[in-house]
Image (cartoon, grey):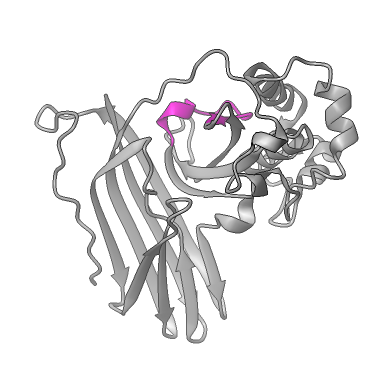
Amino acid sequence: MHTTLIDLLLEYEVGSPSHFLFNIEAAFHEGHHVLQERLTITPSMKVRNFCDERSGNRFIRLDAPKGMLSVNYHARVRLIAVPVPLHLDETPVSGVPDDVLRYLMPSRYCESDSMSRAAQQLFGDLPPGIGRVRAVENWIHDSIAYLPGCTSSTTTARDVFVQRAGVCRDFAHLGITLCRALNIPARLVVGYVHFDEPPQDFHAVFEAWLEGRWVLFDPSHLAPIDRLVRVGTGRDAKDVAFATIFGNVQMLRKELIVDEGELLPDTPPGSHPPMLSLVST
């Protein structure tokens, strides 16, 4: 049994009164349990929290005055292992649940409609099921270079397929796109995970819908996927930005520390220590 310790610091210079929407807290999800958390915002201000019930994503909204803004999120999260069967079938489109159907559609960064021919050429002859999604995952890892700085916030899966380079977000978008082009529902997952080689940052992977369940895949192979603390789940990066800002704002600092450790003896599985959610200066 393992825990993950998370310490995130964001600092901004706010040029004029601006509105912020943050998605930085560990999501409500069966894959982990939040043991402790603390949110500190400086200067002190009114904050509104809400949760998207469909995804479990948790959001923070605030109106920041002109000046400096500091946001610190600290959490200790117990990871809960969810075994994945070796054999899972794909679900026929007619059997895809209504609330999952939207993850078959093209989206802002995942142009599955224009990638259909490429997906069929690469993977159309493979037996349907989890093995085919593993083939997509491995093809991206082997064919796309991991190259920080080579893409931007507007880069799409099709761009990455053409230029053959990207970062974890781009790898995940391409995996989603190829799966959707094969009629496999897929979506983006962003969260915290420890990397052996710094710097730490948010990490993006993708999920595919197989035999009535969501299964995680990581084409980057940067970290064990079962150690991911989920923060955001959505159609693509448009749904899971860690910060959406309306106003004249400049980011000055983003520091993230993610550490792993054994579950402490005084916190046995199934226990529920008090969870802290504080807003203070």
Front residue of this view, candidates 65 and 133: 133
Residue at the far front in the pictured view: 94
Q: Position of residue 255 (x, y in %)?
A: 42, 52
Picture quadrant where residue 77 is located: top left
Picture quadrant where residue 145 is located: top right
Q: Position of residue 214 (x, y in %)?
A: 53, 33
Q: Residue at x 35, y 67 (%)?
A: 49
Residue 146 can be seen in this image: no
Left or right, 173 with reference to 49:
right
Residue 42 can be seen in this image: yes
Vertical relation: 1 (above or below) 28: above
In the image, residue 170 lies in the stretch drawn in magenta:
no
Vertical relation: 44 (above or below) 52: below
Picture quadrant where residue 69 is located: bottom left
Work out which quarter of the rendered image holds the C terminus and state it: bottom left
Q: Position of residue 62 (x, y in %)?
A: 40, 76
In the image, residue 224 lies in the stretch drawn in magenta:
yes
Q: Which residues are magenta?
A: 215-228
Q: Position of residue 56 (x, y in %)?
A: 42, 51
Left or right, 172 with reference to 222:
right
Work out which quarter of the rendered image holds the N terminus and state it: top left
Residue at the far left in the pictured view: 266
Front residue of this view, candidates 271 and 163: 271
Q: Residue at x 28, y 48 (%)?
A: 75
Left or right, 211 with reference to 278:
right
